[in-house]
Amino acid sequence: MNAERYEKAFLLLCGAVLVLFMGALAYATLGMGIRLPGRTGVVDPKTVLTTPPWNDPGLRQLGPDRYEAVILAQAWRYQPQEIDIPVGATVTFHVTSADVIHGFYIEGTRVNFMVLPGQITEETYTFDEPGEHRLICDEYCGAGHHLMSGKVVVR
Amino acid sequence: MSGSGVPTAVVQSPAEPFRLPASQRRLIKWTIYLGFAAFAVAVLNGLDQALNYAGISILKWFPGMRTYYQGLTVHGVFNAIVLTFAFTNGFLALTTARGLGRKLSTGLLASTLASMVLGVALAGWAMFTGRASVLYTFYPPLQAHWTFYAGLALLVVSTWLTSANLFVALSAWRKEHPGERIPLMAFISVCTYVMWDIASIGIAIEVVGLLLPWSLGLIGGADPLLSRTLFWYTGHPIVYFWLLPAYVSWYVMIPRQVGGKLFSDSVTRVVFILFIVLSIPVGMHHQYQDPGIPSGMKAIQGFLTFGVFFPSLITAFSVMAALEMGGRSRGGKGLLGWIWALPWGDPSVSAQLLAMLTFMLGGITGLINASYTINRVVHNTTFIPGHFHLTVGSAVALSFMGIAYWLIPYLTDRKLWGRRLAVAQTWLYGVGVLVLARGLISGGLEGMPRRTFVALSPYNNGQWDLAGILTGIGGTLMFASVVLFFIVLGGTLLLGARSEEQEIPFTETMTAPALDGWEVKLDKFRYWVAVTVTLILLAYGPFLASYLPGHFLSPGFKIF
């Protein structure tokens, strides 16, 4: 029966393709340095509004082209709503939530992560092009979810 | 497979027709009716969601629906939980009974149905009164009314009652047939429930152990990360609980319906065993963008996710081989001529062939989602619902409708009414879901967020108009198709000719199951359960060991 031979060849081919995909992923992760959010820290969501640095959210310069953005997500806004950064700036975002789960998606970039109350999400990104990006909450967070957005301006 | 003749097959399992007692068939029938009733309500709400992306809000025509998200919750819960659980509880109980040639426990069939009715009533009341607009993922600290969680718990219990029914029947069959192999149709049906029983532990702990007492005020806080982890421990394998009933049909019914035979008994068993083993330790690929989980732990589950693609690739080959055999036995010639020779005029077949075609795209987009790095771009955009409307929204839903085209006549002793209308229905759905998915996927790549009332969103600047319009058109076609589906079902119940001679489509396999050697071990579930549990401990153990006892700090929010 030929089908048995065809089946073996098909499965070998499929296996090889899957291994190739995994290799590509390993390269993207280890070679190109594309990272996912990891375990960075916890904060009590009930007292986060008075806990540094969340009691004073905003953008701070750390060095030449190095910035830190502390952002607090709340139903249904970000604090601050807008950040302005110069072209070429590398920004590390530190984000948490004071109430429910939110999303944090800067359109046109790979900055796209979950914001959980009690957990801190960190992400570093370099903005090489001038322009205006919408910052969109992309996780359902209640009746006003579609109203929750902000702005990242690169100039 | 170049010849046109079909090789002689070995009939596996009882060749003599077997019919369940009328009382048991009636319980199965009402369980499946409940699923399709939920489907009707869910699809009606789905029309509102599809049109939302086209910038049209028809919410005001929905009495009692206060917000977009209330309808979206109903759409998700009634489709992804009620329809799938009800259909599977009914369908796989029937295939197990038919495979074993033995009746089931009437008490367990009745308590399955009762548990589902009560679950739907409780969760439905919470959703329709606006007390549970938390979507079907119900992430805390959004807090629903306790009846929502209690209803969900009862729906999960209904699947366990069905499991118990299948296991009792199988164990009785084993005593009566020492040394025999479990008939294939029953084996793969039971495999589905073995996988699900292990998989549903996560959601059971989350709902019964954490969220229900939290919603009643017995526990002060919720842990959003731990809840998400428990949810997705179940939330990924649940997609195989949706899919495997369709696979049961594709493996052991569709070949018969197209005049073909199943090529290999052992390969089929191996595929279902691989689903038991690999479905569960992969849930963290839904949490790639979560804080609080070290990325190495995410990577391990990411790699395993590519592994669970493998049994679906084997399925693509096996099912295609059976289809080719059928097409050639019906006179199909040439490399691809057998495709046109398949019985496309049978709505049950056309539905499931179209379901398979859309599932290829569903599988490919699933691999994209599971890709550790590309996920950053598509995460929580409409790319995701674009993907799963090609899987659960068509591979599963369209297969269920296709199965219904013989199952409802079988259960009601009537002939299918409106056969040509039914064929048109399947095509309309297939085309509709492709247009819808094209809209959602392209919108997602342009950053259109999922689960969002974009029709009224201030940041919607028109960039997603084309994607949204395609989503609206596709969803409208799907809605119209489902209306036709219910017209055909209603016509069958009211106008279908009486016919009591119907049998369940039962495929023959070309090789009989071996009675000795390694293949006998395939039927020993305890081995596969042991391998499964080991893999789960490896995949989830490090996270739980480093995270427990957890951070139960979040009060509930009812801001919906």
Image (cartoon, coloured by chain):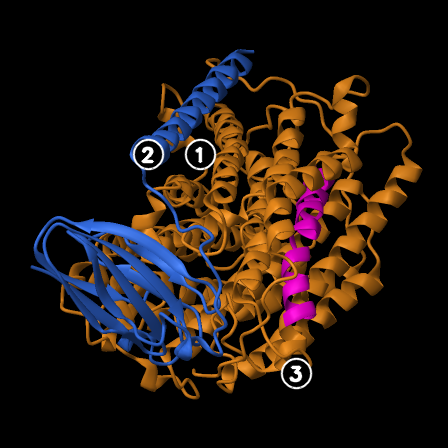
Chain colours: A blue, B orange
Same subunit, tags 1 and 3? yes
Q: Tell us which disc is closer to us: 1 or 3.
A: 3
Q: Tell us which disc is closer to us: 1 or 2.
A: 2
Same subunit, tags 2 and 3? no
Residue range (magenta)? B185-210
Residue A7 visible in the picture: yes
Where is residue B57 shown, x and y percent of the image? 27, 78
Where is residue B174 shown, x and y percent of the image? 88, 38
With respect to residue B266, does A5 lie above or below?
above
In what quadrant of the picture does the C terminus of chain B appear? bottom left
Q: Are marks 2 and 3 in contact (CB under 8 Å)?
A: no
With respect to residue B207, does B402 lie above or below?
above
Q: Which SS class for mark 1?
A: loop
Q: Which SS class for mark 2?
A: helix
Amino acid type, residue under disc 1 in the picture:
Leu
Instruction: Name the residue tied to disc 3.
Output: B216
What secondary structure is the magenta-colored segment mainly? helix
Instruction: Name the residue tied to disc 2.
Output: A28
In this image, B185 relative to A58: left or right? right
Disc 1 and disc 2: Cα gap in Å? 44 Å
Instruction: Name the residue tied to disc 1.
Output: B342
The residue sitting at 66% across, 78% down in the picture is: B219
In this image, B117 relative to A25: left or right? right
